[in-house]
Amino acid sequence: MVTNIVWITTSQSQLRPIIGYLASEYSINTANKFMEEIDKRLQKIWKYPEIGRLSPLPNVRFFQIKKRYNFCYRVQGSTLYVLYIWDTKRNPRTNPFREN
């Protein structure tokens, strides 16, 4: 059972520009809705840690945030680590957690 969520430095640094982009190009409301969607997804993973698609890397899973964004996570013990946020419009070969 997951009891806490940790955003590693990489995923934190990837989230900031996404939120900034959504706020500047669309609206602060859109950025807030995106964050709410992330929270909803994390709550679902909190309850069902194995819900995401498996990655080729051990214990790493993918979960879709919105149509355009996925995040990679790993559960170790009772901690869920958000490892990476992936913009699906980018070249898939540059994703270190890519599916084969």
Image (tube, rainbow, N blue to C red):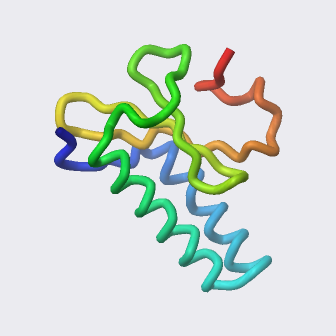
Is residue 73 toward the left or the right of residue 69 in the image?
left
Is residue 39 toward the left or the right of residue 33 in the image?
left
Is residue 67 toward the left or the right of residue 48 in the image?
right
Q: Residue at x 48, y 60 (%)?
A: 38
Q: Position of residue 60 (x, y in %)?
A: 45, 25
The residue lying toward the viewer, choosing from 50 and 68, is: 50
Q: Residue at x 81, y 45 (%)?
A: 89
Q: Position of residue 94 (x, y in %)?
A: 74, 28
Is residue 76 toward the left or the right of residue 9 in the image?
left
Q: Residue at x 65, y 78 (%)?
A: 30
Q: Which quadrant holds the N terminus?
A: top left
Q: Position of residue 100 (x, y in %)?
A: 68, 14
The residue lying toward the viewer, choosing from 52 and 70, is: 52
The residue lying toward the viewer, choosing from 37 and 95, is: 37
Q: Residue at x 70, y 72 (%)?
A: 22
Q: Is residue 91 above or below residue 8?
A: above
